[in-house]
Amino acid sequence: MDNLSMLTDLYELSMANGYQQTIPDEEGVFDVFFRKVPDKGSFVVVAGLQQVVEGLRNFHFDQSDINYLRSLGLFKEDFLDYLKNFHFDCQVSAIPEGTPVFPREPLLTIRGPLLQTQLFETMVLNLMNHQSLIATKARRITYAAGKRPVMEFGARRAQGPSSATYGARAAVIGGCSSTSNVLAAKKFGIPAAGTMAHAWIEAFPDELTAFEKWADVYPDTAALLVDTYDVLKSGVPNAIKVFKKLKASGHKPVGIRIDSGDITQLARGARKLLDDAGFPEVKITASNALDEHVVMSLLNEGAPLDNFGIGENLITSASSPVLSGVYKLAAVSDGGKLVPKIKVSASREKVTLPGLKQVYRLYHHGTKRAFADVIALKDETLNDQLDVVKANPLATKRDQFLTDFDAVPLQEAVLDGEKLKADLPDVFEIQKHSKALLSELPSTTQRLVNPDEFPVYVTHALDQMQEKLLEAQGK
Ligand SMILES: Nc1ncnc2c1ncn2[C@@H]1O[C@H](COP(=O)(O)OP(=O)(O)OP(=O)(O)O)[C@@H](O)[C@H]1O
Ligand SMILES: O=P(O)(O)OC[C@H]1O[C@H](OP(=O)(O)OP(=O)(O)O)[C@H](O)[C@@H]1O
Ligand SMILES: O=C(O)c1cccnc1
């Protein structure tokens, strides 16, 4: 990945320069979390950690960066020297990619020299907000598609090259099976997949010739686009002619793609024509501005579809295009001792959780059925008789008592300085991990429309720490 150190908001550098002149030796702890799930869903599929780790390990400023920063006339030479000789010296712990996570949970925590930790905010949020957003959207779409593979087709509509490429990675984490984006396929070991465009059909004198020429070039992988002229009167009958020839010469016909019109009606008609011609194995792919709702609607209508190709609505998360993850200070050292901190806000909902923390997923004892998450102080041990408080300050009946559970910590150590402390699995391993954890959530939490909220609690100790800090602020 490119060096992203300069992809920062100016105020991070201004603060870091200021810390160096005022409290140069203090330590800081920052948490990444979000408050609102896109698309009124109940969870986010967290993603982007691998790029965060690469970004942090590769964090440096070259001479041209230093020259530019000097030209702003804001920074002391000592600070520019510090940046020039930058040496990453923080500890990072994080919830692994692919994990379904909930509002207010610390997804990633960075502890280290305050002026360093401050510098990472923009880059970390940029990477995690984007990939988590697209992984979450992809999970919604692939959930709607059930077992039918979804190909990611969005590169042409993504908001720029990096969104196309890292978006394809996130799409696979969220359940897509392949991508048309060759750069992403190469970079992340994703199967590269695709069919043909209307241009190919239009480039030949007629549709049948176009299909025949394609089949000559790709006899074993031909998936023919059948909607350039008329799906049922021309596209599918011509495809069948070509499939018959392919079969006669020992090849296996693969599929057709429908990219316009009423997909259910057209897929039904196409399926009948293919079956009647002796091609029940030929697969039907649908595309054309699909999203989770259209996919669900097509399948509810009984459309005989085998695959989906999905671009713009997936790669831009068009229906809900922002994940507002934040990076908030949880503690600062004072003379060597960490002091928990909160951000006090006019809105009670926005008050942050102080201190070093861990998130636990709670399972009914001896089962794989998750029923709640608990955010605790890092040095707490959770016993099996647990008084907790709902993490959402606006919730009613906040106090709860939990028992008879197994608690699994979610955050794990990832970096100690530049030293990697955790495995960074490949995208399909992450996808597998994600599916396994999703299957542990209640089905009512998993559904797309009006899902049940999954309870997230904080321990009494954490709640009390927050209350004390609020009182100290006169709140
Ligand atoms: N049976 C269906 N149920 C629900 N939505 C459908 C169905 N068939 C198609 N759609 C979706 O309806 C939307 C509009 O379809 P429409 O056929 O009007 O597309 P279009 O883009 O206007 O067609 P064209 O590509 O020919 O210009 C697309 O998102 C498409 O995926
Ligand atoms: O609709 P999406 O989910 O983004 O899927 C990708 C679309 O990209 C291609 O169309 P193209 O960009 O050539 O234009 P079109 O919309 O006119 O078919 C393809 O035929 C799909 O329709
Ligand atoms: O291969 C395809 O069919 C494809 C790729 C990108 C966009 N639309 C379609």
Image (spheres, grey):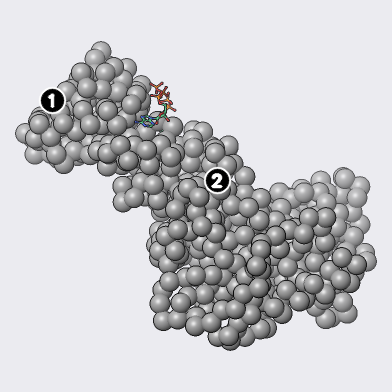
Q: Residues within 10 Å of mark 2 (few under 14, many from 20)?
A: some
Element marked by disc 2: helix
- Quadrant of the image occupied by residue 379: bottom right
| Residue 205 vs residue 104, the one in the foreground | 104
Is 426 placed above or below 245 here?
Answer: below
* Horizontal and vertical percent position of residue 49: 57, 60
Q: Earlier in the sequence, mark 2 or mark 1?
A: 2
Q: Could you tell me residue 365's position as x and y percent?
A: 45, 81
Secondary element type, mark 1: helix
310 on left or right of 219: right
Disc 2 and disc 1 in contact, CB within 8 angstroms: no
Direction from residue 364 to residue 31 in the image, left or right: right
* Real-space Cα separation, disc 2 to disc 1, in angstroms: 44 Å
Q: Amino acid at mark 1?
A: Lys
x then y, percent, for residue 25:
86, 73
Residue 241's tag is 1
